[in-house]
Amino acid sequence: MSTWQVNASEKEFDSIINLPASKSISNRALIIQALLRNFNNNFNVKIENLSNADDTLIMLDSISSENELIYVKNAGTCMRFLTAYFSCLPGVFKILDGDERMKNRPISALVNALRGLGADIEYLENEGFPPLKIQGKKLNPAQNLIIDDSQSSQFLSAVLLVSPFLGHNSSFIWNPSSDSASYNKMTIDVLNSFGIKTELSENQIVVYPVSTNFTYNPNYTIESDWSSAAFFYEAMALQKKGKLFLNKLFSKSIQGDSALIGLMEIFGVQTEFHEKGIEISFNPTLIQPNSKLDCRQNPDLVPALVCIAACQNFSTEFIGLSKLNYKESRRLDELVIHLKKLNWEILSDSESISLISNSGYQTEFIFNTAKDHRMVMAYAMLAFQFKNISLNEVNWVDKSFPNFWEEALNIGLTKLELV
């Protein structure tokens, strides 16, 4: 494994950043597109601005593949959505497998829910974990189904995506205040955008079936990714000079991570909306030191937020982090390790981190990116605080943001492989 040095320019920011399309929306849209086509060959939906992230390419290949073995690497969204997708296709036989990290990411709550609808799914190795053997069949609609989403919002979303194709109304009991609500609302918004009818009440979701005379939306455009924007907000919070224009981000977004706007004001980054995107700049009067941030609805923003807090040297508490250790890496554990290496005194448990005080930064170590795209990007931006840092790997960004290093170059961030 290579070691890379990341360096940052001190030049004032004045750049336009092109963010990737949202892979979260893209993968939902691809499942619906495929199910519509399977339901009726005349239902052809054109998806525009599809993500080019590795996760989305895996989803595209998996849906179109005629192979029995489907290998999704460490793409959790693909594993979960494809489990539901293949389960509801009568006559289809698939084995869903992934890398070693994927084999340690639990999936029993989703499998149990699908089995309750009649799915034929078997564990091939360890009970409750991939790989899975799936024999597709006609599933029954959900009747006030409760799905345990404490480990991942995608368990409920996976079943929501296939529900319109089960012949009758499906209903789910849910908590709109749960940790997963923002992602499940995204799923419902995507369903609605395709023309699929849903109803939300205080504790219930109803999904109505697609029919032969269904009026669908033939064109669907994917938004740019708010989760990826977090790292350029991070850069602004650390550089504190100039302005950045982020293309194709808008105030009316179905992404829960658009909450980034308010969260970043706490760290002094302000947002101004324009017709074609947003402009961000640093305003120190906005800073709210010693804050408490509830990140239950926005776990993907946590790496960037924690890195900013660690550099601005304010005591900060992050709560609602229980899902972080079920991500591409054990993100909570990894952040705790690196905060301690940076000489932060912290308090932490299974769902929170509190930064107490720093006795003087120590950065003479190699940041372990743990094969995690968001950790690579969050740690890379620390170079704007420490001028250069070392990472053990830099290419995992392909998972969500293949052009990250090209866009980072626009703000003066460079990488050099060390011999």
Image: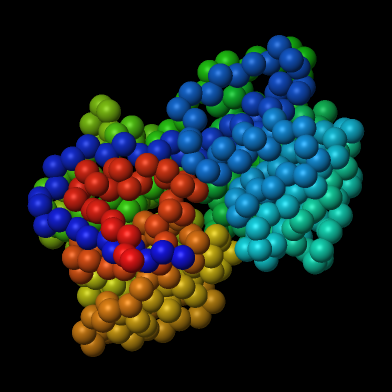
Residue 90 falls left or right of residue 413 = right
Q: Nearer the viewer, residue 151 or 332?
A: 332
Report the label total. 0
- At x 54%, y 35%, the residue is 26
247 up-or-down from 232: above or below: above
Which residue sits furthest front?
A: 419
Between 139 and 122, the one lying in front of the other is: 122
**Depicted 357 relative to depicted 299: above or below:** below
Q: Position of residue 357 (x, y in %)?
A: 27, 84
Model colouring: rainbow
Q: What residue is at 38 percent from the left and 76 percent from the top?
A: 338
Q: Residue placed at 46% from the left, 42% from the top?
A: 255
Is there any visible trace of residue 201 in the rendered image?
no
Image quadrant where residue 295 sits? bottom left
Q: Position of residue 321 (x, y in %)?
A: 49, 68
Q: Is residue 418 left or right of residue 368?
A: left
The residue at 38%/47% (across/down) is 228
Q: Is residue 320 left or right of residue 293?
A: right
Residue 178 can be seen, yes or no? yes
Q: Position of residue 283 (x, y in %)?
A: 14, 55
Q: Quadrant location of the C terminus?
A: bottom left
Give how far across and how far down residue 61 sits, in percent. Answer: 64, 35
**Depth order, front residue of 53/224:** 53
